[in-house]
Image (spheres, grey):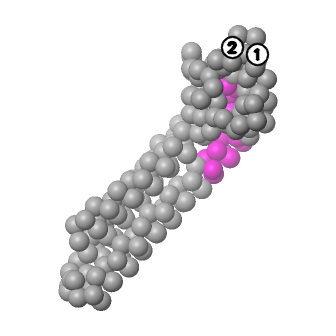
Amino acid sequence: MQSLLADGKKRMQGAIASLEKEFGKLRTGRATTALVDNIVVDYYGTPTPISQLSSVSVPDAKTITIQPWDKGAFAGVEKAIIASDLGLNPVNDGKIIRIAIPPLTEERRKELVKVAKKYTEECKIAIRNVRRDLNDSLKAMEKDKEISEDERKKGEADVQKLTDDFVKQSDSVVAAKEKEILEI
């Protein structure tokens, strides 16, 4: 039963980690390399993430610089950034691509908060799915006479406590992200 709870905890932590990764991709008015991590460039016919064909850095809070290792990749990187839904305009000087992060409008901030809440809801659904799987496993263990009814009920209470803890954790993560997004 302890291994079941440990597995459930690990899976719920995975849901929180995934939520934090999604939040890293949300634009908050601050430059971060995570903004361009999931942009894929058509590099000689092969879809390649920007980070695998260039050096990405953040020289200051409002700028991202991308330096492709191959001169032939400049045009592809530029097109991929423009085509992404981030609303960023790259400037190519032949040696390096600079992306200035413009300040967010109030309307865009509110949209980002809605997106953050949607990601959080998806995280909570994943946590609840883990809870359901654990409870199903406990019921199966009781049915197979591996544990008693009392042990199953105690196990379900432990699973619910674990679920509540992770739902609270996801709420605190989204509250911090919301504060960061709305910060001017």
**In the rendered structure, which amino acid carries the disc numbered 2?**
Ile
Kindly identify which numbered label has been placed on residue 116.
none
Instruction: Give the residue at x 22% y 67%.
Output: 2
Residue behind mark 2: 96
Q: Which range of residues does the magenta coloring cover?
A: 101-115
Q: Is residue 114 magenta?
A: yes
Going by the image, does 77 lie left or right of 55? right
Q: Position of residue 177 (x, y in %)?
A: 51, 42
Quadrant housing residue 3 = bottom left
**Are the residues tagged 1 and 2 within 8 Å (C-beta)?**
yes
Q: In this orientation, which residue lies closer to the viewer: 76 or 64?
A: 76
Our reading of the magenta stretch's main secondary structure is helix
Residue 141 appears in the picture as rendered: yes
Q: Position of residue 118 (x, y in %)?
A: 60, 56
Q: Position of residue 148 (x, y in %)?
A: 20, 86
**In the rendered structure, which amino acid carries the disc numbered 1?**
Asn
Q: Is residue 158 magenta?
A: no
Instruction: Give the residue at x 76% y 11%.
Output: 93
Residue behind mark 1: 92
